[in-house]
Amino acid sequence: MRNHGGKSTAIFAAAAIAWIGVLFFFSGQVGEDSSALSGGVTQLLFGWLLDWGMDFDLLHHCVRKAAHFGIFAVEGCLMGMALLNGLKRRTAVLLTGVGCALLSVLNELHQMQAAGRVCSVADMAIDFCGALTGLAAAAAILHAFSAFRRRMAKKYDDDR
């Protein structure tokens, strides 16, 4: 699963770096803005549950944790796609894991600098689990494309 092309590696690497900007943008929001954004998402996605009497604070907490997981899942997938394209599998997995763990710590420390925000070890763990899930998705996607290419090449060879 390596050396599938320098162009795709560069595209995924650029996307992973750009996504880091997204991570740090959201972690730099002051507490009031961050809470308003996630509160709006909670209302939009789960307004019907709130109408049935579901606790807003519980749903809001779940949305915030899902956002941590999801945003790092995207980063893990993008970084994984970039590194799995160009490196040996073990090296790519190790570098993606270490890179995302470091990003998680730096992101939480950055978040702590914003008014009304805190640094949470639990959020770092959620971030890392999201990143590993994204990495697993990247590996699965690349494996599927590789298998497809092999089948197409075999079919082409058989047709000759």
Image (cartoon, rainbow, N blue to C red):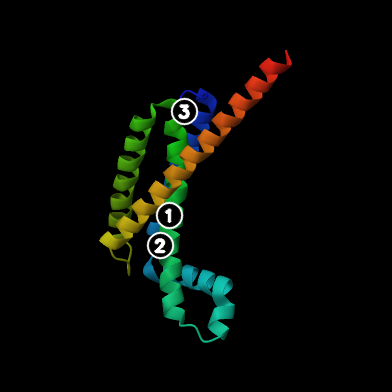
Kind of residue indicated by mark 2: Gln
**Nearer-N-terminus badge (1/3):** 3
Dot 3 alpha-carbon crowd within 10 angstroms: few under 14, some 14 to 19, many 20 or more: some
> Is residue 130 something one can see in this rendering?
yes
Residue placed under numbered mark 2 in the picture: 29
Q: Quadrant of residue 115?
A: bottom left
Report the side of 150 relative to 23 (left or right).
right
Relative vertical location of residue 7 with respect to residue 69 in this rendering, above or below: above
**Residue in view at x 69 percent, y 17 percent:** 158
SS at badge 1: helix
Kind of residue indicated by mark 1: Phe
Residue placed under numbered mark 1 in the picture: 25
Report the Cα–Cα distance between label 1 and label 3: 33 Å
Residue placed under numbered mark 3 in the picture: 1
Q: Position of residue 118 (x, y in %)?
A: 29, 65
Kind of residue indicated by mark 3: Met
Report the Cα–Cα distance between label 2 and label 3: 38 Å
SS at badge 3: loop
Q: Quadrant of residue 52?
A: bottom right
- Quarter of the picture holding the C terminus: top right
Q: Position of residue 95 (x, y in %)?
A: 33, 36
Whether tag 2 and tag 1 are in contact, CB under 8 A, the answer is: yes
Which sits in the foreground, 116 or 139? 139
**Residue in view at x 56 percent, y 30 percent:** 147
Report the Cα–Cα distance between label 2 and label 1: 7 Å
